[in-house]
């Protein structure tokens, strides 16, 4: 038996920055995976997923060879083909679609950025000529990032310093389930004597641990933040020096916040007037502070962008931004080539950009907003800035699905899916399903079989993180001044056993077949990293990626306070924009304002409950890992939490299966009774399907049984008017329940 080798890889079992792992390998087989505690980016707390990596790597449910549909769509009849045949045929079909309908008739779908090569997909699409990349980024992270760019000209990075930082806030973020490192740092903050505050409708573990829990009504964060701004300004609790020197639009913000006196905010948010006063005073009194804003605010359409703006403006006026121990404005890592430089954005002609679906209506995400922001970033940082196009200029997914179905405003004939599971993750599954079936060519490139692969024409096997060199998501974008690279631990191809491509290789191979050969000078993913960290390798005296990974591994630049003094920020005014001139240029309200969703009385009566849909649960990551017994035995079934009073009225007991129903459909989940939130709410889980069930139609691995997105709506009229984010929390989530 040969010796055990130690490889240094980057875990990609979730969407975090990319935790450093040590992978112990013998004869090309993973033996054990452990956290590389010497590296800067690690879970920081116990995370079960790495311990299951071995089961994952060798699981029979993983895709191993390219498959081509040999029966009707969804019949689960497949023929194994070679990579060359698969790529040649797909390229030929894409070329035919481009000739007949135009490049914009080809769309791609993205998820949370798994695969470590979103830049390559964007590059492929820019060179192919299509602006129609859709992704869940519209409801996850792009709104937060774009608000930061528009408001501060960069990401806000918490600078947690015991002794300096006075308060840690989790705003609509349940790190206990969804983020080991951020949960760990919350607990550490407590231990170090910092105050803690949680803003969440539920009394969950973070609420229990916090010094102050604010039980907000879902979807009303904009009003709370504006109410807090109101109190803070009225009582003179803001940082006058910072506001006067480094912000624009304070007087206008003051005026707007004037429309949110505590009694009005109390009415909107369901809090008492005292609670609004006290929360504002408490927040202002404990500065500088760190805040993690979760996904809830952007899931609260129609208030998504304005909620995130309001929360950020609150931070901007209390003296926490650009201050040691508070929130620092990040800058790109010098010498590192960020994603944006790898995307060939200049290759997509302006006339093609203008065709991007949904961007005429939802202008803040998509090209109109991105172009304004990109120009600002470039002015201050040069080419190597951090406004990555893949994240921040998506087409609007619900609009693209409707174009597939209706041919309007023009036909979309193909969807290339990678690192994304559209049938589970987008809202309104039935419509997504019909849209996908209406295409001429549906290709899915994934790690395992999924409901989406089940209806695809081609299903292609992807390499996982243990089979490729990686760097974490956010760092590669340029959002954190940090470079941490890993290497492939085991081969992606073992002739006869499995033949996988990594995401970079896949887009390159497809591109080369479509006339893009000159634009893909880096043959392997290793070549890509060597190119991107060349200056850092030089500085450290390394001649290969391997040497860098083994001897340097990571470079971190501690961000410094005082960015505002050093010169203009990457915003149009060069200052923190309380009044957003970018939103103004896009013809939106430059100041945050709360919009109450207009729900007809008839609907309120028929659907009296509100579904907080899709809270995170360990150990799953969205739709992944349901096939691995080690994960499944920790959490067998989808759970819906129901208040005791509501359950009693419906004759529902703990452990009963319960139907959750809206005007769009009905699914079931298993009841867990609770008194941790208002009786008017239920709390459901998303992305459930069952690898053990039949792959063929009509089951599609039990797609229609428990998948909460069968009941959620993506009607563009209900989406956030600025970003197009569809509602997954808040008043639009009306439903009813009954015992199944
Ligand atoms: N109702 C409701 N819906 C929601 C949410 C909610 O809260 N409520 N949350 C939303 C949010 S925030 C998000 S981010 C989305 C998530 O949406 P998605 O990102 O679409 O969901 P995942 O299930 O993570 O799908 C990722 C797919 O990529 C595959 N994959 C993993 N790694 C790789 C790789 O290296 N290469 C390739 N090619 N494939 C890979 C996985 O096997 C999986 O099939 O869901 C959204 N949907
Ligand atoms: N285990 C696990 N971890 C994950 C993921 C996963 O799938 N599984 N996904 C990753 C991804 S892509 C994402 S986006 C993150 C998301 O991570 P989080 O942002 O922490 O998402 P949730 O778990 O949905 O928690 C949101 C919290 O907001 C509360 N909430 C609901 N509505 C509102 C509201 O209107 N206002 C406020 N203030 N609070 C509200 C909910 O009660 C819930 O406790 O998690 C990441 N981490
Ligand atoms: Mo997300």
Image: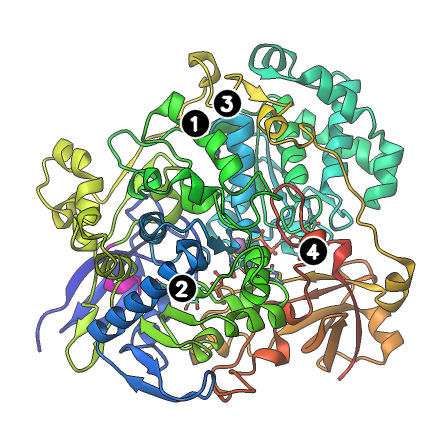
Between discs 2 and 3, the one toward the N terminus: 2
Which residues fall within the magenta stretch?
462-469
Between discs 4 and 2, the one toward the N terminus: 2
The answer to the question of whether label 2 and label 1 lie on touching residues, with beta carbons closer than 8 A, is no
How many neighbours does mark 1 have within 10 angstroms: few (below 14), some (14-19), or many (20 or more)? some
* Quadrant location, the N terminus: bottom left
Q: Is residue 423 left or right of residue 270?
A: left
Q: CA distance from mark 4 to mark 2?
A: 28 Å
Q: CA distance from mark 2 to mark 1?
A: 29 Å
Q: CA distance from mark 4 to mark 3?
A: 31 Å
Location of residue 563 with respect to 438 vertically, above or below = above
Q: Secondary structure at mark 2?
A: strand
Q: Viewer-proximal residue, 479 or 518? A: 518
Residue 318 in sight: no
Residue at 62% over, 81% down: 705
Residue at 57% over, 73% down: 434
Would you say residue 592 sits in the magenta stretch?
no
Between discs 3 and 1, the one toward the N terminus: 1
What residue is pinned by disc 4?
Answer: 729
What residue is pinned by disc 1?
Answer: 375
Residue 423 locus on image (x, y percent): 53, 70
The answer to the question of whether label 4 and label 2 lie on touching residues, with beta carbons closer than 8 A, is no
**For residue 416, which numbered disc appears in the image?**
2
Q: Viewer-proximal residue, 195 or 197? A: 197
Q: CA distance from mark 3 to mark 1?
A: 9 Å
Q: CA distance from mark 1 to mark 4?
A: 33 Å
**For residue 571, which numbered disc appears in the image?**
3
Foreground disc of the pair 4, 3: 3
Residue 313 in sight: yes
How are the residues colored? rainbow
């Amino acid at each position: 038996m040969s010796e055990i080798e130690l490889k240094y890889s980057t875990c990609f079992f979730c969407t975090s920055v990319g935790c450093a792992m040590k992978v112990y390998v013998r004869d090309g087989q993973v033996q054990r995976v452990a956290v590389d505690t010497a590296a800067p980016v690690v879970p920081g707390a116990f995370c079960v997923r790495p311990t299951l990596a071995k089961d994952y790597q060798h699981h029979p449910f993983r895709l191993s060879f390219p498959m081509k549909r040999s029966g009707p769509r969804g019949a689960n009849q497949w023929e194994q083909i070679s990579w060359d045949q698969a790529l040649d045929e797909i390229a030929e079909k894409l070329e035919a679609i481009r000739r007949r309908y135009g490049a914009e008739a080809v769309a791609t779908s993205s998820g949370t950025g798994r695969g470590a090569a979103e830049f390559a997909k964007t590059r492929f699409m820019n060179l192919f000529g299509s602006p129609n990349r859709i992704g869940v980024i519209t409801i996850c992270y792009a709104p937060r990032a774009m608000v930061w760019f528009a408001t501060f000209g960069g990401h806000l990075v918490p600078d947690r310093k015991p002794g300096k930082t006075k308060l840690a806030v989790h705003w609509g973020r349940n790190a206990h389930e969804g983020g080991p490192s951020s949960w760990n740092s919350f607990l550490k903050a407590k231990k170090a004597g910092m105050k803690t505050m949680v803003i969440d409708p539920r009394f969950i573990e973070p609420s229990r641990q916090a010094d102050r829990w604010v039980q907000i009504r879902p979807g009303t964060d904009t009003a709370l933040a504006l109410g807090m701004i109101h109190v803070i300004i009225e009582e003179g609790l803001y940082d006058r020096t910072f506001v006067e020197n480094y912000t624009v639009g304070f007087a206008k913000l003051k005026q707007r916040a004037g429309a949110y006196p505590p009694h009005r905010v109390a009415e909107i948010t369901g809090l008492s007037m005292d609670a609004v006063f006290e929360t504002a005073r408490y927040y202002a009194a404990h500065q500088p502070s760190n805040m993690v804003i979760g996904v809830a605010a952007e899931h609260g359409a129609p208030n998504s962008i304005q909620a995130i703006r309001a929360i950020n403006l609150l931070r901007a006026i209390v003296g926490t931004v650009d201050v040691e121990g508070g929130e620092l404005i990040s800058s790109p890592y010098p010498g590192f080539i960020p994603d944006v430089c790898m995307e060939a954005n200049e290759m997509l002609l302006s006339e093609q950009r203008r065709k991007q679906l949904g961007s005429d209506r939802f202008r803040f995400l998509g090209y109109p907003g991105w172009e304004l922001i990109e120009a600002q970033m470039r002015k201050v940082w040069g080419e190597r800035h951090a406004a990555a196009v893949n994240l921040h200029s998506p087409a609007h997914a619900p609009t693209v699905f409707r174009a597939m179905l209706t041919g309007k405003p023009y036909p979309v004939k193909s969807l290339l899916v990678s690192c994304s599971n559209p049938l589970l993750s987008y809202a309104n599954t039935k419509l997504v399903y019909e849209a996908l079936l209406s295409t001429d060519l549906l290709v899915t490139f994934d790690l395992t079989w999924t409901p989406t692969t089940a209806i695809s024409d081609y299903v292609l096997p992807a390499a996982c993180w243990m089979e490729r060199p990686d760097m974490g998501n956010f760092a590669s974008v340029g959002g954190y001044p940090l470079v941490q690279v890993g290497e492939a631990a085991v081969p992606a191809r073992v002739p006869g056993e499995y033949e996988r491509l990594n995401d970079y290789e896949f887009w390159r191979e497809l591109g080369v077949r479509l006339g893009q050969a000159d634009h893909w000078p880096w043959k392997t993913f290793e070549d890509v990293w060597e190119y991107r960290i060349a200056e850092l390798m030089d500085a450290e005296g390394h001649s290969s990626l391997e040497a860098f990974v083994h001897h340097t591994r990571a470079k971190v630049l501690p961000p410094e306070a005082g960015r505002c003094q050093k010169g203009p920020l990457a915003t149009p005014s060069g200052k923190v924009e309380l009044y957003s001139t970018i939103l103004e240029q896009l013809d939106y309200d430059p100041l945050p304002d709360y919009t109450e969703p207009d729900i007809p009385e008839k609907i309120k009566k028929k659907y009296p409950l509100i579904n907080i849909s899709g809270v995170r649960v360990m150990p799953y990551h969205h739709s992944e890992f349901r096939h691995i017994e080690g994960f499944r035995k920790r959490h067998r079934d989808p759970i819906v939490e129901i208040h005791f009073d509501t359950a009693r009225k419906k004759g529902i007991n703990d452990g009963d299966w319960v139907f959750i129903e809206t005007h769009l459909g009905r699914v079931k989940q298993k009841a867990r009774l609770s008194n941790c939130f208002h009786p008017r709410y239920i709390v459901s889980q998303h992305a459930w399907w069952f690898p053990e069930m039949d792959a063929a139609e009509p089951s599609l691995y039990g797609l229609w049984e428990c998948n909460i997105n069968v009941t959620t709506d993506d009607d563009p009229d209900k989406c956030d008017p600025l970003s197009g984010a569809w509602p997954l929390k808040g008043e639009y989530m009306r439903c009813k329940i009954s015992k199944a």
